[in-house]
Amino acid sequence: MDRTLHDTPPPLPTEIQLLFDYRPPALSTRAEWSSHPQVSPFWFYDRHLDEKLNLLHVKPMPTLPKDLAALVDDGILAMRLRGFPLPEVSSTSVFTPEAYRRGFFPRVTDATSVGRFYDNTIANSCESVASVLAIHPHTSEWLPALMWAKTDGEWRPPSSWDEDFSIRIRFEPETDELLMPNGLPELLGHRTLQNLKDLARRFPELATCEIGVVSTETEFILRDMDRLTAGGFKPIFCGTVGTLPSISVYTPPPDPLSIPWTTRKPLSAVVSRATKRKSLKIHSSVDDSPPRRSLRLHKLLQNAVRQHQPTTRTRVPTQTSSQLPSPNNSAVRINRRSDITPPVRHATHRSQQTDFLVQHTWVRAVCSDTTIILFHCGNFERIGIRHRNSQTLYLSDLIDVVHDTDPARGKLHVGLYMAAYLDTMDRFIQLKELESHPQPPPKVLVPKIPPAPLGRLANKKSTTTKKRNRAAFEADISTDDVESESSIIFREAGLRNLALIQLRYGVFNSVSPASFLRVGRSLAPVIGPIRPPRVRRKYSTREHFTLLLHSTIGRGATGHVHNASLELTTSGGKELAHEVVVKLAFTPEQQERLEHEYSIYRHLASSGVHGIIVDVFGLFRDIEGDTMAIVMSHGAPNGSSLLDTYTAIYDDPSSAAFLAAMKVIHDAGVCHNDVRPPNLLLDDKGKITILDFDRADLMSSEEQREREMGTLTDLLDGVDPEY
Ligand SMILES: Nc1ncnc2c1ncn2[C@@H]1O[C@H](COP(=O)(O)OP(=O)(O)OP(=O)(O)O)[C@@H](O)[C@H]1O
């Protein structure tokens, strides 16, 4: 039978209508139930995105909820036009009915319980309906290929937001298996299943979600986003002045080619401002008119076909993260000729929490390359769209979850799930196409650093200073000849109090470096001030050094560990660099551990223990953030930890070396207390290093140290007490 757009649509199955119209009850909580602090999850890394990936603008998109709900109508219409009836909800169906939704008591404790309430009441049913409308309209059951799930995400400092929920394909990355409900794999067929698997491997999250506790603070933040959409957003970078702007090494990945949302203003606003402004559109197809219903329909009708075929669209010049240039061909951007002015630390205002949350969420969306962003704190929410090309976040108006009915809440969220899937599939197809035609990496232009005007310093300085500089210069030249470059660099770095930390790996490429002030002196050699210095207004080239963090090593209870290049201009004018390791600690507890670890290294250094532990070049604190850093030598530059090469090495000479090293540490009065394979390093020349002293103590008994020696002996013998 021929169907047209003008036929009267048949009524929706009752349960589907109930889902679309679902209005959740108001959630209540008690402040004392939430164990997490009322802060946004903004942290160190959020200031260091590549300049082409950064968030620059926040703009309103008031029509977004209606556009998402319209996507549902279009999905239903597309099914009708293709002759697929909407499945009925039977008692045996996977679909969760209204009675189930209403069975949950609207009391929540923390952000995670807000995410679970959302899961039980709405996500559960949206998954099935969105899956049928967007992925498998030909099937005759409400079976979900999508899911709302919380995973063990990346560690982040505690905050009032849970960041591990997302809309996902039903897929388990650990086992690399799809988790489709019984019967669905047969209905989908091998090809669609393979496509969904590939999509899920590449994009584990189809949206970036921030689920907040129910509190006046989180509600304030969602309301305060109006300030940002009215032009109040300023990107948050490090405030260090005097460095050259960074060179971007990254072209943003593609935006979707066909999307169901626009930045159309309400008609009245458009009419009144028509002469002043052109209505903005972020529609990224060649035709920049808002997506018409027929276009959305066309997309839905084509979706099943597109899952199997490469597109023939014009290629978008872009780079995927796998095509990022390696750190070796990226330019060092610290201007070594001019003075550095470190930032001033300002108190954080309440409203800054909004800017922090928005920038942080944007960074997360960049890391997982998602378009759709959901901010939800129980009774209020906002939906956002990340537009990569214009570096703009488009935000819906504040949605009052309990009271807003236009669009109906259930329908809006079905549309949200559909859009999350369609957007990701669109970009996935583009990326696959790009990878079959790789682009040459962009040429990185290194700007010339103008030479310091000769005599400028000389004019300003007294004759005595001039003589001193000359003496230092000559001393440097003469010692350069006899001293190895590494000892020069560490001697000079040990005397400097300002460390500029830049990130350059993955999506990170600092626009400006973070300024870290020395709070603990260098222990290798033991030099530098006994007391922590004060922040000065300016630091000359000879008074600071750079730490270029270019990859990650691992993460532990104390913080995140990075490979870094320590770079400086010596007092003799030489540019030197040496590989080091930087461990960053974020929370007060981590910083306490790090300070303790540093104090143990200080004790070992003063007891003459050297060569079997890493060299520590100082402890530093971020001037404007809340991060602490320890700078150390690499324990095994070309080696690995026993965790990687784990085999019994009892008869190996390195085994005797580990035992002898532990004896030296014990003789210095230190019990390590954490003897495990990742903390025992062995380099390619057979040199051993024992690291990670954050649990060590100086108060141990003879018996404890003997026990520790026994643990180490067992471990080297292949008897691993923990692994
Ligand atoms: N100086 C270093 N050289 C080489 N690798 C290092 C160095 N410091 C740390 N690592 C590696 O980084 C990872 C985490 O470091 P570390 O164990 O010091 O962190 P932590 O936060 O103290 O962890 P834990 O929870 O084990 O106490 C480990 O796998 C370790 O091998």
Image (cartoon, helix red, strand yellow):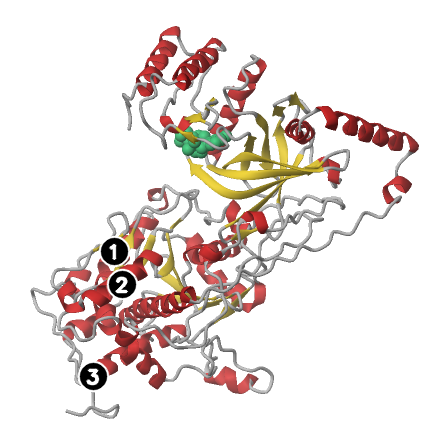
Alpha carbon separation for disc pair 1 and 3: 29 Å
Q: Of circles 3 and 2, which is in front?
A: 2
Q: Sequence order check: which comes first, mark 1 or mark 2?
A: 1
Position of the N terminus by quadrant:
bottom left
Q: Which residue is drawn at 28% across and 23% down?
A: 720
Circles 3, 2 touching at the beta carbon (< 8 Å): no
Which callout, 3 or 2, points at the residue further toward the start of the chain? 3
Count the marks. Answer: 3
| Among the 4 quarters of the image, the one containing residue 97 | bottom left
Distance Cα–Cα, label 3 vs label 2: 22 Å
Is residue 102 visible in this depiction of the protein? no
Residue beneath disc 2: 196
Image quadrant holding the C terminus, namely top left
How dense is the environment of label 2, judged by Cα within 10 Å: few (below 14), some, or many (20 and up)? many
Q: How crowded is mark 1: few (under 14 residues within 10 Å), some or many (20 or more)?
A: many
Give the left or right position of residue 137, taking residue 398 as reference: left
Give the mark nearer the N terminus: 1 vs 3: 3
Q: Name the amino acid type tagged 2.
A: Leu
- Determine the secondary structure under disc 1: strand
- In this picture, residue 227 sits left or right of residue 116: right
Query: Please, which residue is most extreme toward the left here?
Result: 91
Q: Do the residues labelled 1 and 2 touch (CB within 8 Å)?
A: yes
Query: Residue tagged by mark 3?
Result: 82
Residue 64 placement, left or right of 8:
right
Report, in whole angstroms, how far the alpha carbon at label 1 lies from the one at label 2: 9 Å
Q: Nearer the viewer, residue 653 or 31?
A: 653
Q: Quadrant of ligand 1?
A: top left
> Which residue is nearer to you in this view: 111 or 140?
140
Residue beneath disc 1 = 171
Q: Residue 26 occupies which quadrant of the picture?
A: bottom left
Q: Name the spot of residue 513 as percent of width and height, x first.
A: 62, 46
Q: Is mark 2 on a helix, strand or loop?
A: helix
